[in-house]
Amino acid sequence: MNDREKIRRLLETVPEYKLGYIIAYIQGLNAEEEADDAFCEKLYQDYLNSDDPDKDEFVSLEDAARACGVDLDELQN
């Protein structure tokens, strides 16, 4: 039995007056993902429409980490 089937079976046992809580929770889960997707899409579109002359310049992971103040060696340990 997969997770969706488990949820369907569990929903059959939930009293009608509690279903609103479940609906609100699931809507919240979806809203967060949609908001994340919209945010990422906006960043991408801003990048595509940018006039920055360095826009297509390659930056290595090491250089990006250094610019952000991240020590990659610390992350690996």
Image (cartoon, helix red, strand yellow):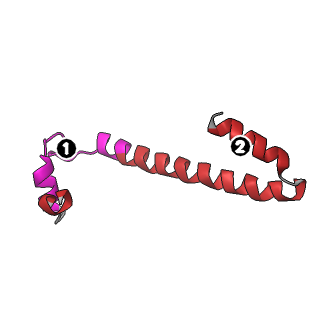
Residue highlighted by disc 1: 55
Residue highlighted by disc 2: 7
Q: Outermost residue toward the right?
A: 16
Residue name at image x 88 percent, y 58 percent: 17
Identify residue type, mark 1: Lys
**Sooner in the amino-acid sequence: mark 2 or mark 1:** 2
Q: Which residues are magenta?
A: 44-67
Is residue 52 found inside the magenta-colored segment of the image?
yes
In the rendered view, would you say 2 is above or below 11? Answer: above
Front position in the image: 5 or 41: 5
Identify residue type, mark 2: Ile
Image spot of residue 9 (x, y percent)? 77, 41
Q: CA distance from mark 2 to mark 1?
A: 46 Å
Picture quadrant where residue 68 is located: bottom left
Image spot of residue 21 (x, y percent)? 76, 59
Left or right position of 13 against 71: right
Mark 2: which secondary structure? helix
Is residue 12 found inside the magenta-colored segment of the image?
no
Image spot of residue 33 (x, y percent)? 53, 49
- Quadrant occupied by the N terminus: top right
- Quadrant occupied by the C terminus: bottom left
Q: Outermost residue toward the top?
A: 1
Front position in the image: 23 or 54: 23
Mark 1: which secondary structure? loop
Image spot of residue 40 (x, y percent)? 41, 47
